[in-house]
């Protein structure tokens, strides 16, 4: 069958994205074909488009979507034609009206979660799940403990603010304006630091924590926040670097970790956590549960036509977006 998709022949600026007619075949063994009703926008899409993350060319973009199963391949036992589903997964290709993909990555949606909410939450929500529930300092996190979360007014950050509050954690947010700081607090952050007016955010973190520092830093900003993040940690704290929005973190001296308090460092990716069907189902159940209970509410800031994804990318890179974005096929 014929569908439409965003295709890139070279990596570069938003202008390299082309809306083209493409052929979509039948699903093979272990695959399903999905008709998208909504597609999510994430910073990894920018990294893949601009060359920060190399990818085969010509290529497709998009890591999360929601829609209806139109066809099921051999050996798929727990999904069927007509199911409302959503996913966050490799390989890229969600920027399309239809696609074929591995069934192990696809989750059936609860009745109370609509397509736009699902598309806005899958990659971001599952990211928060593996961060707050799986990527933890020694001994785990207990209610009442401090964590620092950068870019807290973005799509991932606003989910993290709410989920941390549900877990009883005291989340310190950073954001790039007073308005965005207030948005983070409204979503569950206990404190928020405007890193533009207070670039030495580590000093403020120390002040908030009575000089101790935080147990863990969750940092998707990268180069701009790296040093301050290390300086915000308590001894034996965990530095979680999970993105590079401001640029790639430069090479480090491992001895820094000793000098700053025997710190731990990890660079996780969601796709390791989603490598098996069992793990995907477990993570999805937790995400669907906190959303269904109202503990996490998705803030969809803007909707764009999928064919106009280049405009959405420009707005995301200019930090004009608070919360999540949905692309409509």
Image (cartoon, rainbow, N blue to C red):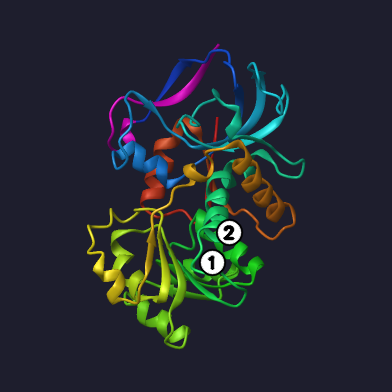
Residue 196 vs residue 170, the one in the foreground: 170
Q: Position of residue 23 (x, y in %)?
A: 48, 13
Q: Residues within 10 Å of mark 1 (few under 14, many from 20)?
A: many
Point out the stretch of residues depicted in magenta: 1-16
Quadrant of the image for the N terminus? top right
Query: Which numbered disc flags the more N-terminal residue, 2 or 1?
Result: 2
Residue 317 in the image: above or below residue 195:
above
Q: Is residue 222 visible?
A: yes
In this rendering, position of residue 281 left or right of residue 25: right
2 and 1 marks in contact (CB < 8 Å): no
Residue 271 in the image: above or below residue 176:
above
In the picture, residue 44 is in which quadrant?
top left
Q: Position of residue 8 (x, y in %)?
A: 34, 27
Residue 74 vs residue 41, the one in the foreground: 74
Secondary structure at badge 1 equals helix
For residue 48: magenta?
A: no
Front: mark 2 or 1: 2
Q: Position of residue 184 (x, y in %)?
A: 53, 67
CA gap between label 2 and label 1 equals: 23 Å
* Residue found 37% across the figure and 44% down from its top: 314
Q: Which mark is residue 133?
A: 2
Quadrant of the image for the C terminus? top right
Secondary structure at badge 2 equals helix
Q: Which mark is residue 225?
A: none
* Residue found 54% across the figure and 55% down from its top: 128
Seen from this angle, which residue lies furthest bottom? 210
Q: Which residue is mark 1?
A: 183
Q: Residues within 10 Å of mark 2 (few under 14, many from 20)?
A: some
Seen from this angle, which residue lies furthest right? 111
Residue 300 in the image: above or below residue 21:
below
Q: Position of residue 99 (x, y in %)?
A: 54, 23
For residue 12: magenta?
A: yes
């Amino acid at each position: 069958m014929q569908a439409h998709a965003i295709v890139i022949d070279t990596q570069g600026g938003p202008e390299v994205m082309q809306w083209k007619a493409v052929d979509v075949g039948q699903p093979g063994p272990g695959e399903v074909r999905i008709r998208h009703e909504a597609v999510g926008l994430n910073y990894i899409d920018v990294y893949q488009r601009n060359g920060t993350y190399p990818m085969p060319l010509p290529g497709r973009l998009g890591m999360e979507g929601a829609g209806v199963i139109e066809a099921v391949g051999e050996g798929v036992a727990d999904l069927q034609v007509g199911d409302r589903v959503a996913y966050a997964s490799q390989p890229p290709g969600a920027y399309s009206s239809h696609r074929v993909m591995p069934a192990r990555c696809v989750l059936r949606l609860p009745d109370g979660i609509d397509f736009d909410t699902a598309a806005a939450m899958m990659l971001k929500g599952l990211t928060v799940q593996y961060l707050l529930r799986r990527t933890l300092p020694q001994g785990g996190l207990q209610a009442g403990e401090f964590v620092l979360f950068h870019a807290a007014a973005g799509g991932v950050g606003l989910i993290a603010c709410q989920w941390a509050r549900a877990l009883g954690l005291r989340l310190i947010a950073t954001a790039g304006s007073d308005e965005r700081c207030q948005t983070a607090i409204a979503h569950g952050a206990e404190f928020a630091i405007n890193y533009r007016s207070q670039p030495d955010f580590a000093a403020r973190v120390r002040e908030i924590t009575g000089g101790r520092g935080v147990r863990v830093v969750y940092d998707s900003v990268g180069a701009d926040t790296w040093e301050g993040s290390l300086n915000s940690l308590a001894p034996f704290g965990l530095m979680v670097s999970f993105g590079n929005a401001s640029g790639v973190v430069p090479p480090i001296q491992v001895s820094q970790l000793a000098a700053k308090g025997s710190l731990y460092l990890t660079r996780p990716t969601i796709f390791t956590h989603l490598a098996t069907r069992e793990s995907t189902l477990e993570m999805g159940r937790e995400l669907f549960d906190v959303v269904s209970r109202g503990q996490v509410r998705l803030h969809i800031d803007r909707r764009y036509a999928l064919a106009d994804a280049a405009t959405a990318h420009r707005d995301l890179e200019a930090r004009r977006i608070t919360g999540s974005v949905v692309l409509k096929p």
